[in-house]
Image: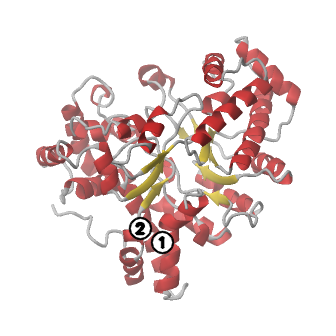
């Protein structure tokens, strides 16, 4: 069976093909949000085999394997990576329609030169070809990043992290890809989590602050933000379900910290009060530092308690949650904007029902400080497939300004995930090229081609202050 990943994959019109091959294809990558390990980059990790490189830690694939009836032993269990790969390869022909089908074949072709659609019939060949590359000079973490034309990437890091590998990478002249940290105070905001009190001890130790009050939490986070800034941090990241930022009660926020440190159960109102207060403080802090603030909204974590008990977090047990109330998002953004403290902000949603809501809200808080100051971020997680990307782009174009979009990111833990940028670029060119083909946009290949190049790379590079 020959490959369907042709030169014109996803590109159905001549304008789409021109935009991709003359503009998008050649642009470098700025992967400004990923979950790669800075240690593995610094140590130039080499994978034992394709099974480890493809299946270790990839909850996208784990979910599909479970849905395909594969026992957990061959998903996250003690089976060998070869056994896990064989099960995944046998399942692959049944995954048509899922983005993993497209991504996997793009990865097989781009990194390992394999043109055939994967199945149990050619699993041996795929295993041998991929492992030959992974065991060679082109198979290490740095080589895989370099082969993808990556100019810079931003990892995701806890405020208590020492960032030692970021500092070592910054001093390593042999690797010319910039690896920057991202400030993600997730655990400091998750005040209802069982491990919150223990985490505050860790954060306080890193910041040299004894944490007993809300102000202590702020002080510790501010000190760690200074530490991250010294390591060339450019942005923060936050993940919420459907938070209520309309609550503003400093007394309730203080009571929340007291109860959390004492191991007492918090009221929902107290949680909201604490998160509203902290996000207001952090947003102003990011504005002062010139950082971007990423808000990932609409995730519901660990739905299956049985799966959580067996495999822990980030194992494929998360799902699409409720939409964020419009008043909640407005309350957070407006408090900051009213004091001229709103940082560059990127809004992502896991619930596609929020697409138009977020684009419309973003348009209310733009200003002349930077083009596209409040962004509607790329299609995220359960939405980063052909239809989801297209819907996100259409919402942004219809209600906002598509030309200012800062484009794609991998949001991935895998060094093989960079063809997702290619996938996005093909989807983008198919959409805009279709407009040209139907007479909805002029055949201005210089002007529109320049816009495509900006969305693929230039806008994000400028937005993060990389110039």
Disc 1 from disc 2: Cα separation: 7 Å
Q: Is residue 121 left or right of residue 65?
A: left
Q: Is residue 357 left or right of residue 87?
A: right
**256 or 84: nearer the eye?**
256
- State the scheme by which the image is colored: secondary structure
**Mark 1 in CB contact with mark 2 (< 8 angstroms):** yes
Q: Is residue 380 left or right of residue 93?
A: right
Q: Is residue 310 above or below residue 281?
A: above
Where residue 97 appears, x then y in whole percent?
A: 37, 56
Q: Which residue is mark 2?
A: 27
How many residues crowd mark 1 within 10 Å: few (<14), some (14–19), many (20+)?
many
Q: Residue at x 75, y 35 (%)?
A: 278
- In the rendered structure, find residue 348 and report the number of the disc placed on it: none
How many residues crowd mark 2 within 10 Å: few (<14), some (14–19), many (20+)?
many
Query: Circle 2 sits in a helix, a strand or a loop, which is it?
Result: loop
Please state, as top left, top right, bottom left or bottom right, where the N terminus lies in the image. Answer: bottom left
Please state, as top left, top right, bottom left or bottom right, where the C terminus lies in the image. Answer: bottom right
Where residue 359 appears, x then y in whole percent?
A: 67, 61
Q: Is residue 265 above or below residue 227?
A: above
**119 or 312: nearer the eye?**
312
Q: Which residue is mark 1?
A: 453
């Amino acid at each position: 069976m020959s490959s369907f990943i042709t030169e014109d994959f996803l590109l159905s019109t001549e304008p789409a093909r021109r935009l991709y091959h003359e503009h998008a294809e050649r642009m470098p990558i700025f992967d400004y949000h990923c979950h790669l390990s800075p240690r593995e980059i610094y140590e130039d990790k080499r994978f034992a085999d394709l099974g480890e490189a493809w299946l270790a830690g990839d909850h996208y694939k784990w979910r599909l394997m479970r849905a395909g009836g594969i026992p957990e032993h061959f998903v996250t269990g003690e089976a060998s990576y070869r056994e896990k790969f064989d099960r995944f390869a046998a399942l692959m022909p049944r995954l048509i329609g899922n983005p993993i089908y497209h991504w996997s074949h793009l990865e097989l072709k781009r990194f390992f030169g394999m043109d055939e659609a994967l199945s149990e019939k050619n699993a041996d060949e795929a295993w041998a070809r991929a492992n030959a590359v992974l065991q060679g000079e082109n198979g290490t973490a740095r080589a895989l990043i370099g082969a993808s034309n990556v100019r810079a990437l931003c990892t995701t890091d806890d405020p208590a992290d020492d960032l030692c590998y970021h500092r070592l990478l910054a001093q390593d002249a042999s690797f010319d890809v910039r690896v920057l940290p991202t400030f993600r105070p997730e655990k400091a905001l998750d005040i209802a989590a069982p491990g919150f009190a223990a985490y505050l001890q860790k954060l306080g130790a890193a910041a040299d602050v004894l944490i007993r009050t809300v102000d202590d939490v702020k002080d510790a986070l501010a000190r760690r933000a200074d530490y991250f800034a010294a390591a060339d941090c450019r942005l923060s990241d936050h993940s919420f379900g459907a938070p209520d930022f309309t609550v503003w009660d400093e007394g309730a926020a203080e009571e929340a910290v007291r109860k959390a440190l004492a191991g007492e159960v918090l009221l929902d109102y107290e949680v909201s009060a604490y998160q509203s207060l902290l996000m207001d403080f952090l947003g102003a802090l990011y504005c002062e530092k010139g950082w971007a603030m990423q808000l990932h909204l609409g995730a519901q974590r660990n739905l299956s308690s049985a799966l959580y008990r067996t495999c822990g977090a980030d194992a494929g047990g998360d799902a699409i949650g409720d939409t964020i109330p419009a008043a909640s998002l407005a309350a957070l953004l407006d408090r900051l904007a009213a004091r001229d403290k709103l940082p560059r902000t990127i809004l992502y949603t896991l619930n596609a029902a929020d697409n138009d809501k977020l684009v419309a809200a973003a348009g209310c808080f733009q200003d002349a400080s930077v083009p596209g100051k409040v962004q509607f971020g790329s299609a995220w997680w359960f939405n980063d497939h052909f239809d989801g990307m297209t819907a996100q782009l259409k919402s942004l174009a219809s209600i906002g300004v598509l030309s200012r979009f800062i484009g794609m990111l991998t949001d991935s833990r895998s060094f093989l995930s960079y063809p997702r940028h290619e996938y996005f670029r093909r989807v983008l060119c198919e959409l805009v090229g279709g407009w040209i083909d139907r007479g909805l946009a002029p055949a201005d290949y210089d002007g529109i081609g320049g816009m495509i190049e900006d969305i693929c790379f230039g806008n994000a590079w400028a937005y993060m202050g990389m110039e």
